[in-house]
Amino acid sequence: MSERSARERILDAAHQLVLQRGFAATTVDAVLAEASASKGAFFHHFPSKAHLGRALVERYAEGDAQALETAMSAAEAETDDPGEQLVCFLRSFEEGAEAVLKIQPSCLFISFIYETELADAGTDDIVARSILHWRERILDKLEQAAADRPALRAVDLPSLADQLFTVFEGAFLLTRALGDKDAMGRQLSHLRHYVELLVSRG
Amino acid sequence: MSERSARERILDAAHQLVLQRGFAATTVDAVLAEASASKGAFFHHFPSKAHLGRALVERYAEGDAQALETAMSAAEAETDDPGEQLVCFLRSFEEGAEAVLKIQPSCLFISFIYETELADAGTDDIVARSILHWRERILDKLEQAAADRPALRAVDLPSLADQLFTVFEGAFLLTRALGDKDAMGRQLSHLRHYVELLVSRG
């Protein structure tokens, strides 16, 4: 088995364990057992548990940025109007919620935001940069959409851009707390509806 | 010092530590040091760390239910219209966000939803009941408001009621991740605005 695959196996196992129990409660031994990897392989790739945490968050943020671009490109292919593009973009997350929950029962960021154990390993910066990247990409569309929509210009657009993060994370918690896999899509539908109302008011 | 005050000191210390680092990473020793309490006092009140967790979540859920009633009663005193009452109710959280963040930098529920260590101590049920209590109270108003508002009736009302939990929790994470204490109020303002638009459309 290649070195890369051992590294990926460790990251995949750690990812699942952190989603299940949080980072602090995830031991290196549990990760090794889940990944069928040796301690030697682990420390070859990750000098410490903190390094593993950082690599996990980096990988997650990259996947997250790709998901953003995929959804935005699809929306841009649908329509030329930035306001309608945003509604399409939000609808794609709403419609994809069930598929997302099958792959990940929660969001890795929640653990790293809530547990401060890792703050010194730089994960805070990666999470914040990821949030701001989504904000910028969505804000850009909102500003374009607001150019000919006075009602939309009356709304605070940067915080509206952040609503997707807020609703996603809150909905992960709601879904998990209630054990209701439909909750995620329903919560996202309200954000889509809100933006739809703002965009349609002109 | 009375027994009660030792118990409260332990709960207060544990509360702050869990908000800072999560439940798994909060050791009994750290709680004792923070509370200036003895191991004997701790185990007199809490036979195990799991019992402490359960007591913490119970106390938090009680405070949460009181906050709901306080805000709803104030809104009911403002106006007789259920739709306007809801807007008032949501506005009170929006306007109180800064004060809430001064008392608590995050929400205790997040740790207990995310970390499964405590699932066997019944905290899951307390959290779920608390969420459903808020849903029922808000849904009741939404249904009253929808009676003479067809546009509101077209919206899925139970999930709209859950939006307050979703936005609150997501906004706690956003606020913490960005270190931006104004983020909470801004996120809540969008939920208030959305409900305002739905209510005013009739």
Image (cartoon, coloured by chain):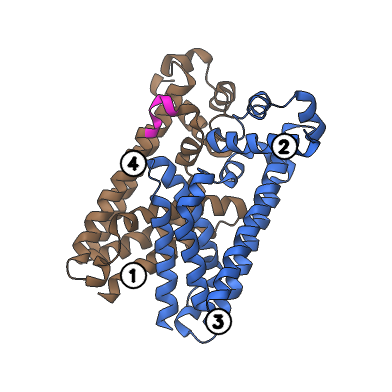
Chain colours: A blue, B brown
Q: Mark 4, chain letter?
A: B
Of the two numbered discs 4 and 3 in the rendering, the one whose residue sits closer to the viewer: 3
Residue at the (49%, 70%) spot, across then down: A88
Tell me the quarter of the image containing the C terminus of chain B.
Answer: bottom left
Q: Is residue B125 magenta?
A: no
Residue at the (35%, 60%) spot, across then down: B90
Q: Amino acid at mark 2?
A: Leu
Sort mark 4 into few (<14), some (14-19) or many (20+) by Cα contacts within 10 Å: some
The residue range painted magenta reads: B119-124
Q: Which mark is residue A80?
A: 3
Q: Amino acid at mark 1?
A: Glu
Secondary structure found at label 3? loop
Q: Which mark is residue B196?
A: 1
Question: Both on one chain, marks 4 and 3?
Answer: no
Q: Amino acid at mark 4?
A: Ser
- Whole-angstrom CA distance, mark 1 to mark 2, is 45 Å
In the rendered image, residue B48, in percent from the top left (x then y), is placed at 47, 18
Of the two numbered discs 1 and 2 in the rendering, the one whose residue sits closer to the viewer: 2
Residue at the (57%, 80%) spot, across then down: A144
Of the two numbered discs 3 and 2 in the rendering, the one whose residue sits closer to the viewer: 3
**First in residue order: circle 4 vs circle 1:** 4
Considering every residue shown, the one lying at the far bottom of the view is A148
Tell me the quarter of the image containing the N terminus of chain B.
Answer: top left
- Whole-angstrom CA distance, mark 4 to mark 2, is 35 Å
- Whole-angstrom CA distance, mark 3 to mark 2, is 42 Å
